[in-house]
Image (cartoon, rainbow, N blue to C red):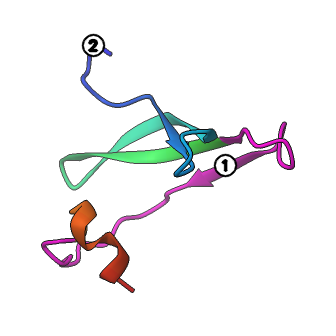
Amino acid sequence: TEDGLPRRAVLSLPSGKAAKDLRFTAYGEENGRTVLRRIEIHHLLPSERGMVTTLEFTAYKPRSLPENLFDPKHARTLP
């Protein structure tokens, strides 16, 4: 997109089959930073097909995260 913000992502099962289609539908500003306000999750598996879950983020609270949180090598060791 022109603003460089993500608009969509697809989550897949280990088999490679698409399971969820995430649509980032609203952004806003909070404390001078661009933040995500709404995600629509479109469920793609046959047992959930047609279902949509909407998550709305109304406030953000800064906090520390472990350095390896987004490192795939450590994903299974996190709680």
Gap in angstroms between the C-alphas marked 2 and 1: 24 Å
Q: Measured from the top left, where is residue 31 in percent x and y?
A: 21, 55
Please say if 56 is above or below 19.
Answer: below
For mark 1, give the secondary structure.
Answer: strand
Label 1 packing within 10 angstroms: few (<14), some (14-19), many (20+)? some
Please say if 33 is above or below 25.
Answer: below
Q: In which quarter of the image is residue 18?
A: top right
Residue shown at 61% from the left, 39% from the top? 17
* Image quarter hosting the N terminus: top left
Comparing 64 with 19, the one in front is 19
Of the numbered discs 2 and 1, the one sitting upstream in the chain is 2
For mark 2, give the secondary structure.
Answer: loop
Q: Measured from the top left, where is residue 46 in percent x and y?
A: 84, 41
Residue shown at 17% from the left, 71% from the top? 68
Q: Which residue is labeled 1 in the image?
A: 54
Q: In this view, does 79 lie to the left or right of 40?
A: left
Q: Which residue is labeled 2 in the image?
A: 2
Can the viewer see residue 21 in this picture?
A: yes
User: What span is in magenta?
Assistant: 42-68
Comparing 28 with 47, the one in front is 47
Q: Measured from the top left, where is residue 12 in percent x and y?
A: 54, 44
